[in-house]
Amino acid sequence: MSNRFLYIADEATAPSRSWSNSDLAKFHYFNPNGLWAAKKARDKKVSKLVNEHGLPSGAILAYGSMNSYCTDRLVKLAGQKRVNGITLRTLLQMLQKDIDDADRWIEDNNPTEEN
């Protein structure tokens, strides 16, 4: 593996404006500071709330791990040498919206916090 990939996948804390679209896709898929890691963390929270507090299991489909279109697509883009910029930006916006929606659902349905 190249030093560039290792930097993007492990060491970078935020994307750089000088990166290619392919690098940006790799950052958001492989890096612990990327959107895929953030989505995975939300998936765990949604599953935990559903399992431990008897909330409707449909939340896993709507907000959790079964809501995987964006992450599945990101996997494909991260494996490509050339990535279309519009496709990538649209996908990252959709993934961020999924994360934001999950955050709102978690906040609204967390029984340990007062609403």
Image: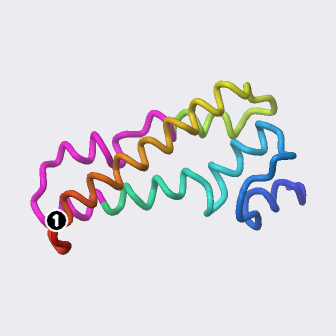
Identify the amino acid type marked 1.
Answer: Asn
Q: Which residue is mark 1?
A: 115
Asked whether, in this view, residue 1 is left or right of residue 35, the answer is: right
**Magenta segment, which residues?**
46-71
Image: 23 above or below 88: below
Which sits in the foreground, 4 or 93?
A: 93
SS of the residue under disc 1? loop
- Which secondary structure type mostly characterizes the magenta part of the structure? helix
Residue that appears at 71% across and 59% down: 14
Residue 86: horizontal and vertical position, in percent? 67, 25
Residue that appears at 26% across and 52% down: 105
Residue 68: horizontal and vertical position, in percent? 42, 39
Asked whether, in this view, residue 53 is left or right of residue 87, the answer is: left
Q: Is residue 93 magenta?
A: no
Residue that appears at 58% across and 39% down: 92
- For label 1, the crowd category at 10 Å Cα-Cα, with few meaning under 14, some 14 to 19 and many 20 or more, is few
